[in-house]
């Protein structure tokens, strides 16, 4: 671990020149050549320098035999050579005044061999002695769509309110894609692997200080300095929600983490205490991670945990109410003025005026949906809203009407949605046509800034996490 200031680390995410040491000739394979090609694919606007002593040209660019031969000192060096050669590259970086280094190479502490541990110790020793800032080894490194530094993850990606700090490159790549499909871009992401030099706390501090970042997502298998991480997470979470997926909860997961990044996981009860005392949001899967991020990035703070659910179908209404209660939310009876107004528009037969509201008209008639929202937004018993949006199918006795989604979006945007409002679009069950239409509808809503979930249970869980985060902040005067 090496404490580093924000200005020191910013260059990792906005380099004007990148040298890649270890770009192979011949057939395409993961490593230096794949990173070079991905940067070219993303239209990286800076200067790229492939390094290979046995090549004159690589990827359409002039190749150089070593870093010393470059026409300038690059802002960032990506190291892709064999593990035994990495210390020598770091020494060369130090001689040339290069400080920002990403070591992609694996084969260190995570191998559980004496050679691997010694090589990683040398990396740490050289970095500390020479003042080098090193990400890794065994990681995918920095990711920054605004700088077109997108050699991995969603390419070219899109900048947005999300910051990601992760030990896993594969998981981080998936989250950048997942978040982008939900209309949420990434300001910065980093996969830091074994954390021989720079660790999760260094990058958490960087994300906390970045005004463009509103939500911080972390995937951690361990932490280098538990005390520092605890105090930092507690401080940062007061102003920016931190959503943590802790890998290695189980004995099997912990054993895999050790061979992944050489991480030694703490007991789960210690992490539970950390979540409770810092107010950070724990999740247990990619879907939960994305669901919580979507709510925290897009929704205002709720005053309480009372949710109003509307949609179509008596059985659906029962199931939706149960799902909300199981996730720790309340499904309160609307106030008398709200009930009186609902009864005027909801037929006595075939529908249910109340909470949940069984009324299919809400997803067919945008103006009527707006009228119901006006009622619940003014109701002090209601803090959040879930709208169940059925996809018209042959099995339903529905008229053949134009798609109401564009008008629905306009209606909701005109309301400014003062209370957290989300959609549930159920398209599960294995029908590929339904799945495709459901995904397209959710993407359409999310692109408009309106969170949409593939199940009411997931929507309710995300809202419950939103409520807990803001309740924790209020309880501590934040």
Image (spheres, rainbow, N blue to C red):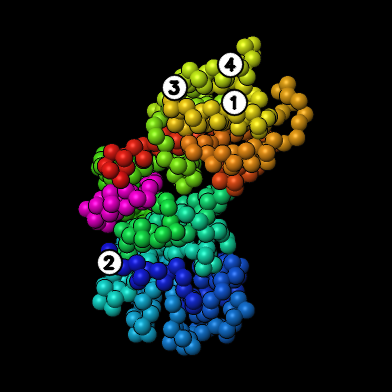
Q: How many residues crowd around disc 3 within 10 Å: few (fewer than 14), some, or many (20 or more)?
A: some
Residue reaching furthest to the right: 400
Compared with 167, 452 (above or below) is: above
Pick the quarter of the image with the C terminus. top left
Q: Position of residue 22 (x, y in %)?
A: 48, 75
Percent across and percent down for residue 55 are: 56, 83
Q: Tell me the CA gap for discs 2 and 3.
A: 51 Å
Question: Which residue is disc 4 drawn over?
Answer: 343
Q: How far apart are marks 3 and 1 (CA)?
A: 16 Å
The reply to whether dot 2 and dot 1 touch (C-beta < 8 Å) is no
Q: How far apart are marks 3 and 4 (CA)?
A: 17 Å
- Which of disc 1 and disc 2 is earlier in sequence? 2
**Magenta region, residue range:** 218-245
Q: In which quarter of the image is residue 148?
A: bottom right
Instruction: Name which residue lies at 48% across and 63% down.
Output: 143
Q: Residue 289 carries which label?
A: none
**Residue found at the very far top of the displayed protein:** 349
Residue 10 % position (x, y): 40, 69
Total numbered labels placed on residues in the image = 4
Quick one: label 1, few (<14), some, or many (20+) residues within 10 Å?
Answer: many
Kindly identify which residue carries mark 3: 332
**Residue 2: which disc?**
2
Q: Which of 190 and 346 is in front in this view?
A: 346
- Tell me the mark number nearer the camera, choosing from 4 and 1: 4
The disc at residue 311 is 1
The residue at the point 27 percent across, 57 percent down is: 224
Q: Is tag 3's residue or tag 1's residue first in the polypeptide sequence? A: 1
Q: Earlier in the sequence, mark 4 or mark 2?
A: 2
């Amino acid at each position: 671990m090496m404490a580093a200031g924000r200005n020191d680390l910013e260059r990792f995410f906005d380099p004007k020149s990148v040298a890649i040491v270890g770009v192979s000739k011949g057939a395409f394979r993961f490593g230096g050549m794949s990173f070079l090609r991905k940067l070219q694919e993303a239209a990286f606007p800076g200067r790229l320098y492939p390094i290979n002593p046995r090549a004159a040209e690589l990827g359409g660019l002039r190749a150089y035999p070593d870093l010393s031969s470059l026409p300038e000192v690059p802002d960032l060096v990506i190291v892709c050579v064999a593990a035994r050669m990495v210390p020598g590259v770091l020494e060369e970086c130090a001689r040339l005044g290069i400080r920002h280094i990403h070591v992609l190479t694996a084969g260190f502490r995570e191998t559980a061999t004496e050679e691997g541990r010694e090589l990683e110790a040398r990396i740490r020793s050289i970095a500390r002695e020479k003042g080098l800032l090193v990400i890794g080894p065994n990681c995918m490194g920095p990711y920054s769509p605004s700088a077109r530094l997108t050699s991995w993850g969603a390419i070219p990606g899109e900048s947005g309110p999300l910051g990601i700090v992760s030990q896993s490159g594969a998981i981080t790549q998936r989250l950048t894609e997942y978040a982008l499909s939900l209309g949420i871009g990434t300001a910065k992401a980093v996969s830091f692997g074994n954390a021989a030099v720079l660790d999760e706390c260094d990058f958490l501090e960087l994300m906390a200080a970045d005004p463009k970042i509103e939500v911080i997502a972390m995937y951690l298998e361990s932490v280098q300095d538990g005390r520092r991480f605890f105090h930092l997470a507690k401080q940062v979470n007061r102003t920016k929600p931190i959503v943590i997926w802790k890998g290695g909860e189980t004995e099997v997961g912990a054993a895999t983490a050790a061979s992944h990044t050489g991480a030694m996981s703490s007991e789960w009860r210690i992490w539970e205490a950390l979540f409770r005392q810092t107010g950070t949001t724990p999740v247990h899967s990619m879907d939960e991670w994305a669901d919580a991020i979507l709510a925290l990035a897009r929704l205002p703070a709720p005053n309480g945990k009372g949710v109003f659910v509307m949609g179509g179908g008596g059985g659906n209404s029962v199931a939706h109410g149960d799902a909300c209660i199981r996730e720790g939310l309340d499904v309160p009876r609307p106030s008398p003025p709200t009930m009186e107004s609902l009864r005027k528009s909801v037929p006595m037969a075939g529908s249910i005026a109340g909470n949940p509201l069984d009324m299919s008209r809400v997803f067919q008639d945008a103006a009527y949906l707006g009228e119901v929202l006006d009622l619940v937004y003014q109701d002090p018993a209601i803090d959040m809203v879930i709208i169940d949006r059925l996809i018209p199918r042959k099995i339903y006795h529905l008229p053949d009407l134009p798609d109401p989604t564009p008008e629905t979006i306009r209606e909701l945007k005109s309301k400014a949605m003062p209370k957290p409002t989300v959609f549930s679009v159920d398209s599960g069950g294995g029908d590929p046509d339904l799945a495709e239409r459901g995904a397209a509808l959710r993407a359409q809503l999310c692109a408009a800034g309106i969170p949409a979930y593939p199940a009411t249970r997931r929507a309710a869980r995300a809202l419950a996490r939103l409520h807990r985060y803001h309740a924790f902040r209020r309880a501590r005067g934040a």
